[in-house]
Each structure stands twice: as C-alpha cells, then as structure tokens.
Image (spheres, rainbow, N blue to C red):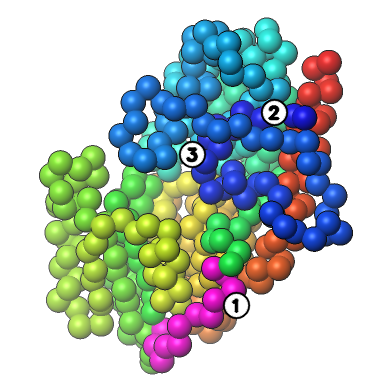
Amino acid sequence: MIRVASVPSSHAYVRHLQPVVGAAPHEMSVDPAVIVLPDPAPVRVDVPGQWWPPRLLDARWLAEQTDVHFDVLHVHFGFESFTADELTRTVEHLRAHRQPLVLTVHDLHNPHFADSADHLRQLDVLVPAAAAVITLTAGAAAWIHDRWGVEATVVDHPHVVPLERMTLPRPESDSFVIGVHAKNLRSNMDPLAVMDAVVEAARSLPDATVRLDIDQDVFESSSHWYSPTVGAKLLDYTSFPDVDVRVHERFDDDALWDYLSSIDVSVLPYRFGTHSGWLEACRDLGTAVVASDCGFYADQAQVHSFGMGIDSFDPDTLVAAVRAAHADRTPAVDSGVRAEQRQRIAATHAAIYSAVTKEMR
C-alpha cells in the first residue's frame, strides 16, 4: 500500500484524482493500493474543513511527528504560506527520510498575488526537488521545462461538478445570459474593466442579457475582501436596464452549479493566471467560457479568448469572443466521458506514485 500525504487531500480537485467509486472494473485497471491520508488539522481552525496552512509543509512539525507515516508527499496548493527557505528545510527533511515529493504545478502565477516573485522562488525550491512534476497543459509543461529543465507529465484537469449533478438537464431559457461573476475581487480579476465591452456585446445580440454577480464580502468592512470603491462602481451597472446585478453571500457548491447552469457564457476577466477550475465546472454544465488569453486557459479546454493581461485589455476582442460564444453553443461534457477520464487520471497518478517510491528503495 502506498500512503500519499496530499497537500491538501480534502480539495475537490484532489478527490477527483481518485477512482470513481463503483466504476465498472473493465473501464480502467487502477492500483487499489493507493490511499490518500486525511489533512492534518492546522494550528488554528477558523472555518469548517480548513486545511491551511498545511502542517505537512512544516519541517519542524514533520520532525516532531511519531504517528504520521506516509510514503509520498504530493503538493498541490498551500505552499504560499511558507518561504522558500522554509520549503528548503521541508525538502531536506523529505530527502533525509527517503520520502519522495510529487508536485502538481497548478499555478505558474499565483492568482491571489499580482507580484509573482515569491511564488516563483517557492517553485524554484519545489520543482527541482520533486521526484515527479505534473501539470495540466502542454503550455505549462513547456514553461516549466524552459525555466527549470524539468519534464512535467501533463494530466488533464478532472471534472469539478459531481458526476451525478452533471446528468441533470439545464433549465430552459429564451435568452442568452452573459455572466460576469466578480466573486470577491480576487487579485487577478478585473470585472470592472470588461463590463462596458460585455454590455456592448450583449446589445449587439438579439436575445442577450448581462448578469453581474458580486460576493457580499466586497461590501463588508470586516472582510479581508472589502473593496468599497470598486464595489460601488460595479453597483452603478444597476442603472443599465439590460444588466441584472446581484449581491449575495459566496455561493456554496450547489448554488454555484445552479448559477453556472443559469447562464449561457461565463466571462473570466483574469489579468494573470495559469489554469482554472471554474472553466472546468463550466464545461461540466454546458456553459461556454470566454477567457482572457493570459495563462493557458485555451490549452486547458476549448474557450473563446480575448486579449487581456496585467497591463493590457482589448475590448474589441472581448466583444468578438462573446459573439462567437453566442454562435457556437457549448454542450456539456458527458458525465460518462468525465468518469472514464477520471479513471485514466487515477491510473496515471497511481503509476507515478509507484515509480517514485521504487526509486527510493
């Protein structure tokens, strides 16, 4: 049995790297001897299910443990909580205990921070130290090779929406709803920049409306995400007769699936980033995606791209991308296809874990 300490293990992405429970045995031959250990509780828990900052990346904590036994440490997220020097000590601890590191590079530019310098310094430690590196697109793999000379295995992003939810039909609608979700105005998002172009695109289409959603956190002074100036400017769109502005608490998963099913296209106003789970959730539910051309979203899946970067935005390309999404309606990815994909992903991970543990023997 290979015991994998995943950082984290409770994240939906990580759960969907594991075989589908009850899948037909002939679909794929997946090594049943891989077990993913639960997340150790952090020092302080502020919200249910919290796994961050991850104890498994704290070299001092690892050295003190007598009841935490794993064969592979697989890092996905959470290493931004540690400096490069701290991660170096973690890598040295793993090496001394012959515990291989597997790293999935989700982000080459952390979407929560405009300045990527710290993130790259952290990756400068983790990527060369990893016994195996995984990423989600060929473009990201090429970037990794160019910077670190490391060959990354490209593994597709699994489904995000539960397979059983994917089988439900989309609600019927007579209009084409263009969704812009500002969420909590994460650092890489600039919904204000794109709204005028989105409205222009909607007005050029016979059946289109715009829905703008904003998390309540943006307007609460006690919130980390408090941004009253941008929030107020977004609220100005309530004066537009063809824009439906909604402010609400952050969606839980079920509400998010309902939201994505109620819009026809989701505009992702990202100024920087790499890959997107939101994009995959849209695919699962048959919602088209219009995404900026930063990062590797177009490598990840079929999207309608427009020009946008840290210091640039081309509104004409956004209008064209929305019109293209209107002309080319996106069917949902079949849940059976996603289940088969997940079995392949699980088999690939099991093979990687087996290979890196054998190398340590």
Q: Earlier in the sequence, mark 2 or mark 3?
A: 2
Which quarter of the figure is the C terminus placed in?
top right
Does the rendering let one see residue 320? no
Q: Earlier in the sequence, mark 2 or mark 1?
A: 2
The mark found on residue 3 in the picture is 2
Q: Nearer the viewer, mark 3 or mark 1?
A: 1
108 left or right of 220 in image: right
The residue that disc 1 covers is 331
* Cα gap from disc 2 to disc 1, whole angstroms: 38 Å
Give, as a three-letter code, the residue at label 2.
Arg
Q: Secondary structure at mark 2?
A: strand
* Cα gap from disc 2 to disc 3, whole angstroms: 30 Å
Q: Nearer the viewer, mark 2 or mark 1?
A: 2
The mark found on residue 109 in the picture is 3
* Mark 3 burial class by Cα count in 10 Å: few <14, some 14-19, many 20+: many
Does the rendering let one see residue 272? yes
Image: magenta residue range: 165-176
Magenta stretch, overall SS: loop
* Cα gap from disc 3 to disc 1, whole angstroms: 30 Å
As for residue 22 lying within the magenta part, the answer is no
